[in-house]
Image: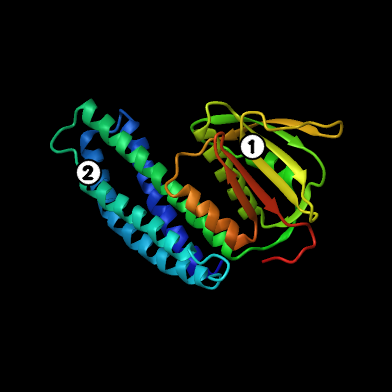
Amino acid sequence: MNDRLSIALGAVREGAQAIDNLSHLLRARRVGPRAIAVALGEVREGCRELSAALSALETELCAELSLSHPRAPDAEGIARRLLSQGSACAAALASQLDMKGKADARTRLSLEDLARRSAAKFDAVIFLAELLAAAASQKVVPLDIGDALLELASVKGGAARVKVSVGLSGPRIFAGDARVVSGLLWLSIGRVARAASSNPSIAVTGSSDGGVEVRVSAGDGIVAGPETELLSLQIPLQEEMPMAGEVLKAATELAGVGLSEAEEPLCIALLFGKAGGAGP
């Protein structure tokens, strides 16, 4: 990831953090209406800056993705639509952040909810943009899929967690970028968990070409053998993300990761290359 892209991502993160901070300020009952009015004005101005930052991020991300165009011809268009949605959200938020002369509890609660939901949307946009950027500029090293899943379970925060049963069979080492692998796993788990009425499961097996296949399924998709290592993990459940399916497809194409999906019940299979293999 080049410096300009990193700076653009940082500017968007800063703007999103200011909106999240506003939700906490609105929740603090000791903060009076005058301070709230000042904060709302600052965040309204910040929304305009956030829109400009999202536009700059779109330029830099699409420039990065253009270098990988043969692998993922739709990635640029997906990035543009994703960040355009972010800009539209910033504009809408700026127009709604107003006490309208009222300082009552209901107004504050309404604004707090608006700020919290908006911050979650921007977090989702940032996560998806970062995943595309990382997939387009991988640093491929040998990774252990078990370690990657344990690290995902150790992530702090999140409004809720989902119980995920894991069965590890066969090879566990493969070639990949830790940022991309973590993002693809988290996105797949979140999509399956939200689509199913039961907790998801992950079955890890070896592939015919020496790679590692990870199948994220609704319900129990593990066929345990005598050498299968079983884990039970609590994974943070991400907020519902716009364009998650499109970004997942583009990111796997950029990263050279195999992807297949089955429905009813939803199952997402990721195929990672063997360690020592050529990167994309």
For the C terminus, the image quarter is bottom right
Name the residue at 39% across, 66% down.
56
Q: What is the basis of the colouring in this image?
A: rainbow
- Viewer-proximal residue, 110 or 237? 237
**Image quadrant in which you'd find residue 67:** bottom right
Residue 46, image x and y in percent? 30, 54
Instruction: Check disc 1 and give the amino acid type.
Output: Ala
- Disc 2 secondary structure class: helix
In three-dimensional space, the C-alpha distance between marks 2 and 1, rounded to whole angstroms, equals 36 Å
Residue 117, image x and y in percent? 36, 39
For the N terminus, the image quarter is bottom right
Instruction: Check disc 2 and give the amino acid type.
Output: Gln
Name the residue at 58% across, 60% down.
253
Of pointers 2 and 1, the one earlier in the residue sequence: 2
Q: Mark 1 packing: few (<14 Cα in 10 Å), some, or many (20+)?
A: some
The numbered disc on residue 41 is: none
What is the residue that sits farthest to the left in this orientation?
101
Residue 4, image x and y in percent? 48, 69
**Number of marks present in the image shown:** 2
Determine whether, in the image, residue 260 is placed left or right of residue 63: right
- In the picture of the structure, the residue carrying the numbered disc 1 is 153
- Viewer-proximal residue, 145 or 72? 72
Name the residue at 53% across, 70% down.
69
Name the residue at 28% across, 30% down.
109
Residue 212, image x and y in percent? 75, 49
**Image quadrant in which you'd find residue 136:** bottom right
Give the vertical position of 219 relative to 266 (above or below): above
Give the vertical position of 188 relative to 218 (above or below): below
- In the picture of the structure, the residue carrying the numbered disc 2 is 96
Q: Mark 2 packing: few (<14 Cα in 10 Å), some, or many (20+)?
A: some
Determine whether, in the image, residue 97 is placed left or right of residue 63: left
- Disc 1 secondary structure class: helix
